Image (cartoon, rainbow, N blue to C red):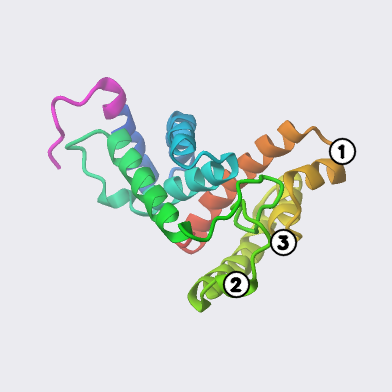
Amino acid sequence: MEINPNLSDKALQDYKLVLAAIEGDQRAFAELMGRYRDAIYYMLLKMVNNKSDADDLTIEAFGKAFKKLSQYTPNYAFSTWLFKIATNNCIDHMRKIKGHRVSIDINTEDEEGDSTMNLPSDVLDPEEKLIRKQRKILLNTVVEKLKPRYRKLIELRYFKELSYEEISIELELPLGTIKAQLFRAKELLSIILKHSSGKF
């Protein structure tokens, strides 16, 4: 495969990590995520203006990128490819929720982390309901692979559907700690999901 000679040293390092990740090197996945997680998050935060959505969209972006990793070609930087995936995914997300979002009150989040009022259940079409049901089943099968503290956070957030504030009270931990640990838990879960089923 021809490599663009204009790639920076960092881009070449990224490409080596991509090759390692394709071969199944877990450290390579973690390194790629560590390099770009914050940049992706803050870019998405500017787009959606909602921290919870930005968290979830960041994980989705890496999930989609890792799933398509073999399609990446080094004629341009990995970061360029990754940011394009993140941007397109975010645009799709905003199109889906356009017209349904009625509030940005972060204390009223649904199971996906979207900030909404208590909307009638018929707002979701049958396909979306099925997707959410399948996602919960999939989560149930893989969440057991997480360390106990991360497993507890995922269970409280996505199965019991508690808010960040409620989880903070339940576990007697600062809100900031809960958000940071839950973000890490979702990172780990996304990697497990990739290698368990190829689905996110």
Give the labeled residue for mark 2.
Answer: 133
First in sequence, mark 1 or 2: give its number.
2
In this view, the residue in front, 120 or 157, is 120
Circle 2 packing at 10 Å, graded few (<14), some (14-19), many (20+), is few
Residue 115 in the image: x percent, y percent? Answer: 61, 51
Residue 174 appears in the rendering: yes
First in sequence, mark 1 or 3: give its number.
3
Looking at the rendered structure, the kind of residue marked 3 is Phe
Quadrant in which residue 93 is drawn: bottom left
Circle 1 packing at 10 Å, graded few (<14), some (14-19), many (20+), is few
First in sequence, mark 2 or 3: give its number.
2
* Mark pair 2, 3: CA separation: 11 Å
The residue located at (44%, 60%) in the rendering is 96
Q: Main secondary structure of the magenta part?
A: loop
* Mark pair 1, 3: CA separation: 19 Å
Secondary structure at numbered mark 2: helix
8 in magenta: yes
Picture disc at residue 172 = 1
Looking at the rendered structure, the kind of residue marked 2 is Lys
Span highlighted in magenta in the image: 1-12
In this view, the residue in front, 5 or 182, is 182
The vertical placement of 97 against 126, above or below, is above
Looking at the rendered structure, the kind of residue marked 1 is Glu
Residue 33 in the image: x percent, y percent? Answer: 46, 37
Residue 9 in the image: x percent, y percent? Answer: 27, 21
* Mark pair 1, 2: CA separation: 30 Å
User: In this rendering, would 162 be left or right of 87?
Assistant: right
